[in-house]
Image (tube, grey):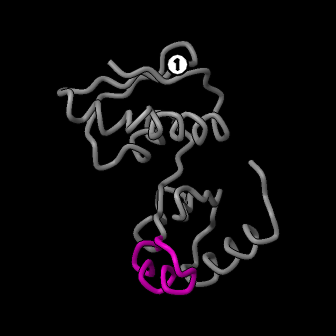
C-alpha cells in the first residue's frame, strides 16, 4: 500500500464528510474506492453524491472485515457466490458462468485487483474461482 500526500488528503476529506474511519483508499480506472469498517458502510454511502462531486470522479465504498471471506464477499458484491478459506487460499464457488465471468473480468483484471486488495489486508496466498 503506497500512501501519497494526495491519498492522505482524500482520506481526511472523506472521513470528515462521512464521519467514518477509512482503512484504505484505492484508485482504479479513475475511480476512488474507500475501505471503511463494515458497520459504517451505510453512513458513508449516504454522502456518496457529495463526495463524488468534490473529488470530481466516481467514488465507491467497500466494507472492510477482519474475516477474509466476508471481505471478499464485500469486494465481489453484488455478485453472489460461496466463499471459503482453505489453507490461505480463498475459494469462490459460483452458480453460473455469467457470475464467474463478472468476477474474473476482462483479462482477469477484476480478479487481479481483488487479489491485490485482499493480500494487502489479509494473509492469503491466492484466490481460486470454481
Q: Is residue 76 above or below residue 51?
A: above
On the image, which quarter does residue 43 sit in? Answer: bottom left
Q: Residue furthest top?
A: 87
- x and y percentages locating residue 5 in the rendered image: 82, 70
Check disc 1 and report its element: helix, strand or loop.
strand
Q: Residue furthest right?
A: 5
Q: Is residue 21 magenta?
A: no
- x and y percentages locating residue 39 in the rendered image: 46, 60
- x and y percentages locating residue 67 in the rendered image: 52, 37
Q: In the rendered view of the protein, which quadrant contains the C terminus?
A: top left
Whether residue 88 sits left or right of residue 72 in the image: it is right
User: Start and end of the magenta stretch?
Assistant: 44-58
Whether residue 52 sits left or right of residue 76 in the image: it is right
Q: Residue at x 53, y 81 (%)?
A: 56
On the image, which quarter does residue 6 sit in? Answer: bottom right
Q: Residue at x 47, y 57 (%)?
A: 62
Q: Residue furthest left?
A: 96
Q: Is residue 13 above or below residue 122?
A: below
From the viewer's side, name the closer residue of 31 and 41.
Answer: 31
Mark 1 closeness class: few <14, some 14–19, many ≥20 residues within 10 Å: some
Whether residue 22 sits left or right of residue 91 in the image: it is right
Q: Residue at x 65, y 41 (%)?
A: 121
Q: Is residue 47 magenta?
A: yes
The secondary structure making up most of the magenta span is: helix
Q: Is residue 20 above or below residue 23?
A: below
- x and y percentages locating residue 89 in the rendered image: 52, 18
From the viewer's side, name the closer residue of 24 and 32.
Answer: 32
Residue hosting label 1: 89
Amino acid at each position: 500500500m503506497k500512501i501519497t500526500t494526495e491519498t492522505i488528503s482524500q482520506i481526511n476529506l472523506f472521513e470528515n464528510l462521512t464521519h467514518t474511519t477509512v482503512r484504505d483508499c484505492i484508485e482504479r480506472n479513475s475511480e476512488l474506492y474507500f475501505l471503511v469498517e463494515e458497520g459504517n458502510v451505510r453512513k458513508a454511502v449516504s454522502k456518496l453524491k457529495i463526495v463524488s462531486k468534490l473529488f470530481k470522479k466516481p467514488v465507491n465504498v467497500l466494507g472492510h472485515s477482519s474475516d477474509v471471506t466476508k471481505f471478499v464477499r464485500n469486494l465481489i458484491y453484488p455478485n453472489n457466490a460461496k466463499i471459503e478459506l482453505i489453507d490461505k487460499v480463498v475459494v469462490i464457488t459460483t452458480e453460473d458462468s455469467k457470475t464467474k465471468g463478472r468476477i474474473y473480468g476482462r483479462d482477469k483484471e477484476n480478479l487481479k485487483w481483488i487479489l491485490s486488495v485482499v493480500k494487502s489486508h489479509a494473509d492469503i496466498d491466492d484466490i481460486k474461482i470454481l
